[in-house]
Image (spheres, grey):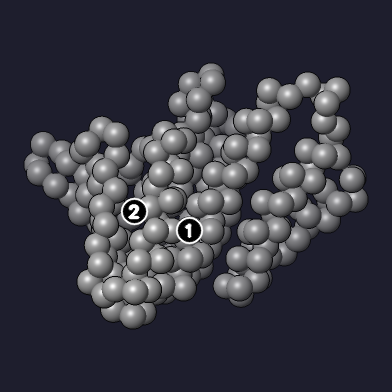
Amino acid sequence: MKISNFVLSRNTIDNRFKYGIKFVPEKVLNKYLDYMLVVLKKLNEKEYGFNLTFKKDKLFNNIQLSTNEFKTYINMLYDFYNSSEKEENFEVEFIAKNSKDKIILTSLNDNHIKVCSIKENFNGEKRVFFILMKEELIDYITSLNAVYRENQIQRNLDGVSKEFIRKSERDALYLQTLYIWTNQALDNKDIEAFEVLSSEIKKIKENL
């Protein structure tokens, strides 16, 4: 799986989107048009949410989750992975709060799982699915958790007086997330992402 981190411009769509991660599984027909995304989105002045996008060619499903729903989704992924190690044809279903969006995970065999996003509209259900190797599922879970953790750290820092936490301490917390993404880039032999992240780590460490 190819994993790419990206930061969106402050001018993008009224500055509602901050950053995200793009996932291109190994078993896709078109590595340019088929992918999954997770993007941190500002819902209002005090609240952030997450967009999960599943796109294949011209078909795509976009599922919006609150922060709590996103954490529940991550926990479900962990539980599914652990259960799929013990059972074949194992299936779990995540239902968004609006009850119209679903993500179904199915263990196909010892090495592969299916991630199927389902979105209801006036024409019925629209399904977009991907086949992932179980090693790719772990990369996916780790990346989602890194995005969640970074956002939680930032939210906690927003409410902390600068008298209680120095800039160097905030940078140290940010480094934790960068190291996770760097290890993922290294594992996936994504040289471009590794170099960008390493450069960012170097800048932070020089200022600590």
- The residue drawn where x is 72% and y is 45% is 174
95 w.r.t. 103: above or below: above
Looking at this view, name the residue that lies furthest to the bottom: 110
85 w.r.t. 20: above or below: below
Which label is found at residue 162? none
Instruction: Give the camera-side residue of 141 and 206.
Output: 141
Q: Residues within 10 Å of mark 1 (few under 14, many from 20)?
A: some
117 w.r.t. 132: above or below: above
For the residue marked with disc 2, what is the amino acid?
A: Phe
Give residue 123's position: percent from left, percent from top: 9, 42
Q: Is residue 176 visible?
A: yes
The residue under label 2 is 54
Give residue 40's position: percent from left, percent from top: 51, 39
Q: Is residue 59 visible?
A: no
Give residue 5's position: percent from left, percent from top: 58, 54
Mark 2 element type: strand
- The residue drawn where x is 66% and y is 30% is 156
For the residue marked with disc 1, what is the amino acid?
A: Ile
> How far apart are the two marked residues, 2 and 1, measured between alpha carbons?
15 Å
Which label is found at residue 141? 1
53 left or right of 104 in image: right
**Which is more foreground, mark 2 or mark 1?**
1
Instruction: Give the camera-side residue of 79 and 51.
Output: 79
137 left or right of 157 in image: left
Looking at this view, name the residue that lies furthest to the top: 45
- The residue drawn where x is 39% and y is 48% is 73
The image quarter in which residue 79 lies = bottom left
Give residue 167's position: percent from left, percent from top: 84, 35
- The residue drawn where x is 54% and y is 29% is 15
Mark 1 element type: helix
